[in-house]
Amino acid sequence: MFSFTSIHQQIESEIKSLHFTYPPKSLYDPIEYILSLGGKRLRPCLTLMACNLYTDNLNNAIRPALGWEVFHNFTLLHDDLMDKADRRRKKPTVHKVWNENTAILSGDAMLITAYQLIGQTESEYLKEILDLFTGTALEICGGQQFDMEFENREEVTEEEYLEMIRLKTAVLIGACLKTGAILAHAPAKDAINLYLFGVHIGLAFQLQDDLLDVYGDPATFGKNIGGDIICNKKTFLLINALKRANSQQKEILKQWMEKTVFEPNQKITAFTKIYNDLEVKELTKKKIENYYEQAIFYLNSVSVEPQKLKVLTEVANQLMGRQY
């Protein structure tokens, strides 16, 4: 078994070796920029780690793994544009370094590049992996559309929100794990259990990201705090705050949500006070723990020696160990 560190190093090396030779170079500069910002490389690493449960030969999984990483970064590029985000991984976002039109077009080129990499899957599994890729990509688009629609809706249920983050975030993590299992000739049931492990750890991860957007340390979080509040995103925290709020608290929240001109820090402070009063931080942490426990259940259902699952368990623990 390879360690997460060794797999991560291999992925980083492979990403650095990607070359974009088609003209004009200006189309690919933003792609190289966003890929150079680093990150955990969680998704391609999970593809190789799932493959490694069954074989030490990871060569046939590397290009599809890179495809998932390029696709993931494509979604971040367009998400930042739609969210009007200024920073990504402590650096200016692509549309800030260049402009919005460049971000759109270079994002499109990233998506095509992802297809090229996925297309290098060995022929025996190409259709299955391509179907998984396209299906997951459409689910993510659906999740993003729900996310945008929720911003303009007065009421969003907790169930609707959880389905949105399943589509927008969690299915990608599941698909990366399933890809590695498929390419390693894993039993179909194992591929499903690894997918479900990924989906549930993805749900926990996104809820934790929502929590950190309010309570995280900007120095370690990598993004400005309060971005979801400023954009009126119907996160798990806001949905449950509206559900628990008394009439006065609900009115304060709605007044801030209706303002088009405001001081961002004042809005963040007002929301955070109500969140604290209603104990939505504790409620969110409990939901995160529930999803984490379900994820570990599915992981432990995979039919390999328990020792081989240790590296995936450690990754899950590290993801859930981020500081508030």
Image (tube, rainbow, N blue to C red):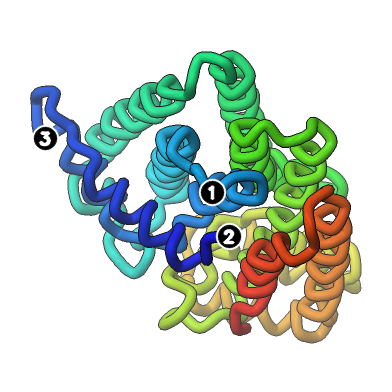
Mark 3: few/some/many CA within 10 Å (<14, 14-19, 20+): few
- Residue at (58, 60) in percent of width and height: 1
User: Would you say residue 149 is visible in this rendering?
Assistant: no
| Left or right, residue 135 beside residue 28 | right
Which of the 4 image quadrants contains residue 106? Answer: top left
- Residue at (34, 60) in percent of width and height: 38
Mark 2: few/some/many CA within 10 Å (<14, 14-19, 20+): some
- Residue at (62, 83) in percent of width and height: 324
Q: Earlier in the sequence, mark 3 or mark 2?
A: 2
Mark 1: few/some/many CA within 10 Å (<14, 14-19, 20+): few
Kind of residue at badge 3? Ser
Give the percent coordinates (x, y) of residue 322. 60, 78
For residue 1, the mark is: 2
Q: Are marks 1 and 2 in contact (CB under 8 Å)?
A: yes
SS for dot 3: helix
- Which circle, 3 or 2, is nearer the viewer? 2
Q: Earlier in the sequence, mark 1 or mark 3?
A: 3
Give the alpha-carbon distance from disc 1 to disc 3, as whole Å: 39 Å
Q: Compared to 194, does 92 lie above or below?
A: below
- Residue at (38, 44) in percent of width and height: 77
Which of the 4 image quadrants contains residue 219? Answer: bottom left
Report the residue marked by disc 1. 56
Give the percent coordinates (x, y) of residue 17. 22, 44
SS for dot 1: loop
Give the percent coordinates (x, y) of residue 59. 43, 38
SS for dot 2: loop
Which of 323/114 is in front?
114
Q: Earlier in the sequence, mark 1 or mark 2?
A: 2
Q: Compared to 3, does 304 lie above or below?
A: above
Report the residue marked by disc 3. 26
Kind of residue at badge 2? Met
